[in-house]
Amino acid sequence: MPQAHAQTPAPDRPRAPAATPMAFVQAVCAAYARAQRSPEAALQAAQIAPEAANAGVGYTTADAFERLCGHAMRELNDEALGWFSRRLPWGSYGMLARASLSAPTLGVALKRWCRHHGLLTSDITLAVQVQGDTASIVWTEHQAPGGDGSLREFCCVSVLRNIHGLACWFVDSRIPLRGASFAFAAPPHAQAYAVLFDGPTRFDAEQTAIRFDARYLDLPIKRDEAAMNQMLQRALPLQVRPYRRDRLLVQRVRQLLQTQPQHTRNADALAALLHLSARSLHRQLKEEGATLQALKDEVRRDRALTLLQRSDKPLKQVAEAAGFQNEKSFVRAFRGWTGMTPGAWRARSCAPASPQASRSPST
């Protein structure tokens, strides 16, 4: 895979399970075969048994695969590992990252990266597209990766994970995917895609792309030249490591609470919609200076006030629409927000202004 543009894991993070398909290891070995060279040294550096690589069955760890790719890309001087009709010499993807660093926002940086990628190879085209509130990085293939399409999966996964990892690094934020689609059949190791790409994955699709919330495109670039130099010195093959921090998490939680009150009544249900565990959700909100309860209260209060003022729904229906399990808990919470009962607040807010109050002062 291309060199890393991802966050280095925290020292206390437990070792990741073996989740990288050995089929990708086999693809790296195929790059050596096309160059008429032996992958023995690269496999030894990654501590991967040659017989396991030849079989192409099962999984290896991300760390082992990073060592394998790093060795292979340097030894073969090709960061594309045989995907394209011309080699991408070592440092090519670093050059793309550096050329995008001066962009004011992530959206500009990604468009620049995609445009410049076309200068390295014309075999594929990458483009940033926005439709509604969803942004996509779309892959268009002009020549089959590997010449015969045998490296299509390895190439697609590698390039899309590269740009996704760089995007996360640029804005110093986790960018959760809404989904990924691939214009090829599901491989035998399709279950690994749950780790490779968060969000639902679809195969045999009309379009190869990854999708995410378009609001991330407006985030400013957080990295500078010094950070870029440090990142490129590591020169690790790409393995996108989930960022713990999501700079739009508070907005995303608030939006889900607003639009799906019936499906976000507890932390487990809400976390599932965000593809997180409840524990991770609470931790990440705390890192952003927020709590789930405070966000719930804010959204419920705003919804309740709006319904009380703009509708004549009974209190029981207002309570349900605001996400409360019963009217009693709603009244108790409402007193805490306003110091009044919902009925009293509605009567006061909907009462017509008195003639005296509405009369213009005499001159």
Image (spheres, rainbow, N blue to C red):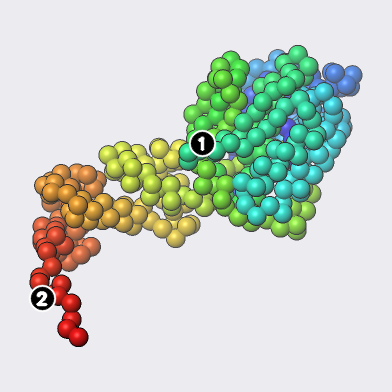
| Residue 228 visible to an observer of this rendering | yes
| Residue 19 visible to an observer of this rendering | no
Q: Nearer the viewer, residue 76 or 19?
A: 76
Residue lying at the far bottom in this picture: please name it: 363
Q: Which residue type does callout 2 highlight?
A: Gln
Q: Name which residue lies at 58% across and 23% down.
A: 207
Q: Is residue 11 left or right of residue 259?
A: right
Q: Position of residue 243 (x, y in %)?
A: 57, 47
Q: Position of residue 118 (x, y in %)?
A: 76, 34
According to the picture, the residue beneath numbered tag 1 turns out to be 131
Badge 2 density bin: few <14, some 14–19, many ≥20, Cα 10 Å: few
Q: Is residue 51 left or right of residue 363?
A: right
Q: How many marks?
A: 2
Compute the Cα span from label 2 to label 1.
52 Å
Q: Nearer the viewer, residue 299 or 107?
A: 107
Q: Position of residue 148 (x, y in %)?
A: 75, 13
Compared with 276, 68 (above or below) is above
Location of residue 76 by image quarter: top right
According to the picture, the residue beneath numbered tag 2 turns out to be 356
Compared with 98, 210 (above or below) is above
Q: Position of residue 65 (x, y in %)?
A: 71, 32
User: Disc 1 on helix, strand or loop?
Assistant: strand
Q: Nearer the viewer, residue 306 or 357?
A: 357
Residue lying at the far front in this picture: please name it: 363
Q: Is residue 238 left or right of residue 252?
A: right
Compared with 317, 159 (above or below) is above
Mark 2 touching mark 1, by CB under 8 A?
no
Q: Is tag 2's residue or tag 1's residue first in the polypeptide sequence?
A: 1
